[in-house]
Each structure stands twice: as structure tokens, then as C-alpha cells.
Image: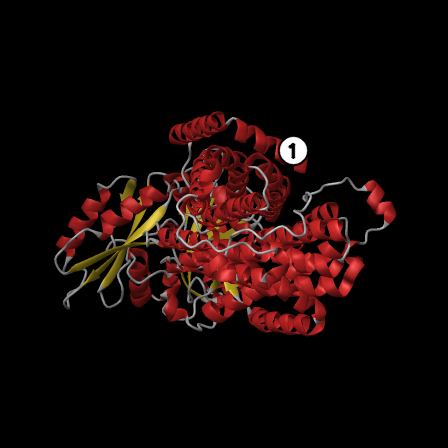
Amino acid sequence: MERFTRAIALSCSRHPWRTLAAWVLTLAAVFALAAGVGGTFTDDFSAPGSQSARAMQLLDENFPAAAKGKVVVVLEAEDGTTIEEDHTAVADVLDRVRGLHNVASVTDPVRANTVSDDGRIAFAEVTLDVPEREMGKPAFTVLSDAVSGLKATDLRVELGGDAVFLNAEEKSSGHVGIGLLVALLVLLVVFGTAVAAVLPIGLSLVAVGASIGGITLMAGVMSVSVSAIPVAGLVGLGVGVDYALFVIARYREHRSAGRGNQQALADAMSSSGTAVVFAGGTVVIATTALAITGIGVLTSIGLATSLMVLSAVAAAVTLLPALLGLLGDRIDSGRVSRRRRPARPLADTAWWRFGHRVAARPWPYLIASVVTLLAVAAPALAMQTSFPAAGDAPKETTHRQAYDLLSEGFGVGINAPLLVVADLRASGVDGAGVSALAARIGSVRGIASVGDPTTSTDGDTVVLTAIPTTGPADPATSGTIDRVRQVIPGNVYVSGITATTDDLNAQLSRTLPLFIGAVIAVAFLLLMLVFRSIAVPLKAAVMNLLSISAAYGVMVAVFQWGWGARLLGLEGPTPITSIIVVIMFPILFGLSMDYEVFLLSRIREEYVDTGDNTEAVARGLAGTGRVVTSAALIMVAVFISFVSSPIPSMKMVGLGLASAILIDATVVRMVIVPATMALLGRANWWLPAWLDRILPHLAVESPAPPADSPAPEVGELVTR
């Protein structure tokens, strides 16, 4: 692989203008196609074959009116009046809602008997002219702003419903810019020159921009989650900067050793460039494996993240060499400090000394590190996941205001309606038994009321709405759904947001073992191919699982238990989203492999060169410790910046990923890995002879610089 990566990089470096032109043309084509045939974003939370999925399929096929998107306009009479007393203002508001784009019909709350007992709060059901998934996030934002912006004397107007909550757009908080600014500052410290610092930032932005166009194109042929770009972009920014950092750092190291620019680039791409391809490929495989879950929202986020990482890898092995070829010696332009400290040999650095210290006393370092990780991970044993509801949204949003008003006026269960769909063509309940079915459902513990049945025009499908006594995120609602499903015949299905998420969680429970096993197995095989070892991939799998568990432990303590939640802008404990936990696993596993590959490939280089395991570990740590730590700081800065997002789920992703990367790049890679490698000695590189013969060879290392070569001028301000 190293020859292939080297050849591509050298070709791009020798023909930089052609490479730049190819990227410009590709970006232009992608954005043009995305503008023309790109789709809108919508979340597909259905679990194939589940009751909720079957119910929605019946509605799509036989009850188009019921399948159309629905939202609710919530009205509150203020200053001591009632809805009936303000009927003129109510009628005026609803008339204006009827005239809005995408609105097909609006009910009258008085006629529909959707006025609270005290007469202060009412809601009007709004039927859209298209199904929710076809409307798109921007259109929902326009509708939300239009309805919540309606002014009426003595009347408060809000727009709510699951569709509004799930399609709410995030208001920009500038967190992306903050993360990139911190990354730039770290790069300035790492490289000491403005040009070298700006280059990784620029490459990551190009890669993310290209991927956004590609994801928009993907939305034209499949359902793509509204969270796909935020989550994938978060990962894309981090890996884009890190991959460029690894290559540039190795390139400058070879230049410091006296090699010419072309030779330095060739050697850097043979080692770090190949490691980028391998590490990026591992992330791509891990995130693509989300398709194993069979859940549309996870599949689309996994594919979007894979596309982001692929773009980052492509930029690192093609665009970056072209730019380095154009810059030449100007890569060191814009030095931030006039005083230039002389470079020192690797064997005279703090990392080299630390590596020998760990190797000399591996057991104390190993035990202390593992105990620390287990303590941080312990809260994960108490993790309880659920699906977010509008009640978890920021208080200033219209859907949260509507949620609170509905709960106040009609009970919290009004926000978790169950949609009961009967297929009268199948055996079970028939048209004559619908009334008895409604009564049976109404008698179930946990059901507050059951609405009148509505029959499709062809008479084949009947829909009833059942209101539980508990809210959408309450575990008691799941129990109520189970009891309802126990009393209905085989041709009746229960849907609704809570039923759908319950079915989704059941699907995850069935597929997660296969998904996790596949990710670990593929990573194990790839590491075994590269490092010709059994111990290395086994340790990597265990260490990655420890890092991920520690990140989950941090999430439980902060979000579920509420420790420091207010510092993150939350009101208190917040349910951990089950989908977020699943999404984080392949991303963290893949990113953890990045640092594993870069550290171990360098250790392997040194071991092949010296044959001394202890010295190889120390020199590998010295050669990568500064760069890996700096890369982790950048990744943490990008991830932690998303904690300022107003959306709780994005806070969870940001904090979880940042915690895992910080732990992985410090405790795991810098302490546990060297300690275990020192303990195992030559056994690190043991592979049965028969297995070595049948496995294909896949190398990511190239000859290391001479042993007495000076260390690169990176990290001088923070690593000496």
C-alpha cells in the first residue's frame, strides 16, 4: 500500500496545477448536481418489519390523508380570558395559518372539542399537503417561524407536534468557528509557522464542503437524516485537520533530517500517508457498518460520515501533496517566533525519556491507568437511554412552548399519542368490531382516552388515536404500548413516536451484537494484516472498548445524573438518546484506531530498524507523542465546541467524542499501550508461521530516519 500512496502523492506533487484543477472541477460538479437533483433531509426512524412500520405502510397505501404530515397550532388565552371569549382572534389566526405554504387544512378547536377544561388552552390540528418526510427541514422552519410569529391580541400562538420537533433547525451558535479557531492556535504552536498551520484547516474545509454536496446528492436517492451533516461534519472537521497534521509533521521531520523536499514528501507519504489511508479506511468501514442495524436514520448517518472521512483521506493524499509541492520551502513561512530553537535528537526528548520510564516500570503505570479508566467508565453501567421529546428542547423554541402548553392544558400524554391502525382486509377485527376494539383499548391501564375511529374512503383501513396518561419519554408509556399490543388482534398495529422508538430500540437490541462484533472483527483483521501480530490487534480492541466505555461513563454522569449539566446550558438531567450511543460507537472505534495505527506503525518501524523492543517503544513514543497529542487537542477542540449547540443530542455527541479522544490519546496511547508492549516484549510481534504464510501483506511503515537524526521542530512551545 505504501508504494501506491507514494506514487499518487508524487504524481500530484509533480503536477500540482492539474491536481488543483481536478479538485475545483469536482467540487463545481458536485455542487451543481446537488443543487439540481439533491434531495431534502428527513429522519427515517422505522424499524423494518415492526408494528409501527407496518402501520405507517398501511397509511401510505390506503389512507393518504392520514399519512400526510400533521402539526398542531397551540393557542393560549391570556389576561384572564378564554378561547371562546377570544373566538374572533382565534378565527383570524387560524385563517392566516390556512393561507400558509404547505398547509392543506386546519381544524376548529371548538368544533373538534380540543379546548382545555378551563377554557384557556386549545389546539388546532394542521394537516400538511405532503407527507412529513417529503416536506424537508427548511420548509418546517419557515412554517414554524410563520406560525409562532403570528400576533393576536390576548392570544399566544405556538406550533408543536413531533414533526416540528424532529425537523427543527439548529440556530447557529458559532461553535464550528470556535473549534476551528482553537485548532488553528494549536497548529501554530505545533508547527511554529502560519503557512503550515493554515494548511490543515483549509484542507479540512475543502473536504467537508465536498462531502456536504455529496450527502445532498445522496439525499436525492435515499432517506438521509437531518442530523447527517452535523454529525458527519463534526467528524470530518476533526479527521481532516488531523490527517493533514500527521502528513505535514512527518514531512517536516524528514526535511529537518536533511532530505530534499521531494524525497521528504515521498517518505512522509510512504509512512504517514499510508497510515492515513489505513486509519481512514478503518473509520469508513466502522461507520458504514451502521447499515447492519437496518435502521434508516443510522444507515444514512453512517454513510454520510464515511463520505466525510473518504473526502478527508482523498484531500490528504492528493490535494495536500500538490500544495506542498507548490509551496516548497515556503511551508516554513510566517514564523510566529523570531527565535528559532535548535532541533534535538529523538533520544533527547521528554517523550523518549517518558517512554523509557514507562518501559522500566510498566506494572504501576498499567495498573494505575486501567483503574482510572474503569472508574471513569463505571457510571456507564447505570446508563438508561430513551428517545428525545420536545420537552427536552430549549425553552425558547416554539415546539417546546407548545409542548408545555399542551401538557398544562390536556396532560402530558397528549404529547405521546398512539396511532392505532386496523387493516380490515386481513383476518382479525372487522368493521363491525371497531367500536369494541376502541373500548378494549380504552380500558387498558395507562390509556386516558381513545378518539373516534376514522375510516379510509375504500373502507379497508381504520385509524384510532389513543392518548396515554404519561409522556413520550416516560418508560411507563412503553409499558402502556405493550399492554395495548397484547389486547389487539393480528390485523391491528400501533404506531406513533413512542411506539416507533420502542420498535427501533428492539431492533437495535437484536442487531447490536452483530454490528459491534463486525466492527471489532474487521478492525482486528486489518491490524493483524498490517502489524503481523495477534497481540497488537487484541490489545487495540480491548483498549478501544475501554476508551468508549469511559466516554459513556462521562455522558451518564453529565447528562443522565446532571453533574455540571447547567454549565452546558441544560436545565438539569437529560435523557441520553439511544441512537446517539449507537452512532458514537463506530466513530469512536474508528478514530481510536487512527492513533493506534500512527503510534504502532512508528514503533514497528523502529523495531524493524533496531530489533530492541524497549528502545522501539520509547522511540516510537518520542516520534509520535507530540504529534498525536497535538492532533488529539485539535480533535477535542473541534468536538467540545459542539457542546455550545442548543440541541441536547449535539451536546452529547460533542462531549462524548471529546472525552473519548482525550482519554484515548493520553491515558491509553501514551501510557497503557507502551506499558503493555514493554511487558509483552517480542510477543508483541508474534504471528503463527502458518497464518503468516496465508495472510496477504499490508504494510504502513517505511524506513525510519537515521537514529541520530534530529527531531522535527514541532511542538517546541509545549513539548520540550
At a point 17% along the width and 59% down the height, the residue shown is: 155
Q: Which residue, as the protein is rendered here, is positioned at the far right?
A: 690
**Position in image of residue 57 (x %, y %):** 50, 42
Judge whether 31 appears above or below 435 on screen.
above
| Amino acid at dot 1 | Phe
Residue 643 placement: quadrant: bottom left
Q: Looking at the image, can residue 548 be seen?
A: no
Judging depth in this view, the residue of 241 and 404 nearest the camera is 241
At a point 28% along the width and 58% down the height, the residue shown is: 114
Q: Looking at the image, can residue 341 be seen?
A: yes
**Position in image of residue 430 (x %, y %):** 52, 47
Judging depth in this view, the residue of 559 and 549 nearest the camera is 549
**Position in image of residue 505 (x %, y %):** 56, 57
Identify the image quadrant of the N terminus.
Answer: top right
Q: Of helix, strand and loop, which one carries label 1?
A: helix
Q: Which residue is mark 1?
A: 4
Q: Is residue 279 left or right of residue 325?
A: right
**Position in image of residue 499 (x %, y %):** 50, 56
